[in-house]
């Protein structure tokens, strides 16, 4: 059974939830499974230390999961954003499309979209737009690392055919 991890806000500890799947990663690769859990925890801790707030983390995760076509992760992060963090539905829907009313968040979502779509290249204009929106280079690097870690989780959840145990959200269109 693949272990699911519900993202934590600064006030809630991470909780472990067993999730059925086609590919039983915990059984066949327990060391790898523990490493993945540590990666998620370490990424979240580093984003906290860099000042990337929980709301923005979830919006970036939602955008990446949308682009990568991962229904499980999109459902989980949409649930966390709405039910745990209390984000408005219109903010969550906008993030799925790489948009936000907040210029800083919009710049980081567009940067994360470009990084995800083009596998790290061709984001020069988005880097400059993020700088113009007041995003520091350190914040950009943290978000780019977060996008890469999230893509890894998306690919694994898709390969394992993880059953969705959150209110289901389907990615729109084809994965990039």
Image (cartoon, grey):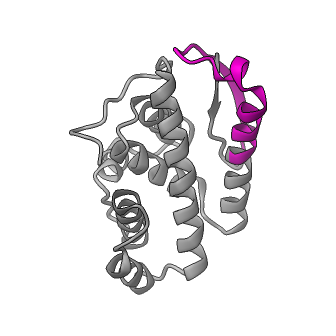
Question: Residue 24: which quarter of the image?
Answer: top right
Residue 59 x %, y %: 45, 51
Which part of the image, by quadrant, shows the N terminus? top right
Q: Is residue 21 magenta?
A: yes
Q: Residue at x 62, y 40 (%)?
A: 7
**From this viewpoint, which residue is outermost toward the left?**
173
**From this viewpoint, which residue is outermost toward the front?**
28
Magenta part of the chain: 11-39
Q: Residue at x 48, y 38 (%)?
A: 155
Question: Residue 124: which quarter of the image?
Answer: bottom left
Q: Residue at x 65, y 67 (%)?
A: 51
On the picture, is 63 further left or further right than 55?
Answer: left
Between residue 154 and residue 49, name the one nearer to us. 154
Q: Is residue 170 above or below residue 93?
A: above
Residue 122 x %, y %: 34, 74
Between residue 95 and residue 32, name the one nearer to us. 32
Q: Is residue 58 magenta?
A: no
Residue 106 x %, y %: 36, 66
Q: Is residue 134 above or below residue 116?
A: below
Q: Is residue 63 above or below residue 119?
A: above
Q: Residue at x 32, y 57 (%)?
A: 98
């Amino acid at each position: 059974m693949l272990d699911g991890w519900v993202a934590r806000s600064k006030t809630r500890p991470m909780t472990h939830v067993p999730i059925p799947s086609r590919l039983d990663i915990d059984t066949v690769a327990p060391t790898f499974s523990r490493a993945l859990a540590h990666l998620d925890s370490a990424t979240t801790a580093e984003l906290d230390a860099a000042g990337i707030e929980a709301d923005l983390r979830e919006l970036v995760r939602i955008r990446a999961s949308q682009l990568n076509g991962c229904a499980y992760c999109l459902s989980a992060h949409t649930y966390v954003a709405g039910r745990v963090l209390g984000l408005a539905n219109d903010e969550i829907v906008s993030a799925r499309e790489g948009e936000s009313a907040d210029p800083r968040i919009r710049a980081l979502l567009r940067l994360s979209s470009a990084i995800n779509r083009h596998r790290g290249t061709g984001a020069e204009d988005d880097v400059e737009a993020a700088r113009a929106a007041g995003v520091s280079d350190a914040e950009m690097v943290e978000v780019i690392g977060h996008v890469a870690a999230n893509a890894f989780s998306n690919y694994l959840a898709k390969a394992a055919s993880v059953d969705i145990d959150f209110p289901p959200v389907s990615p729109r269109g084809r994965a990039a």
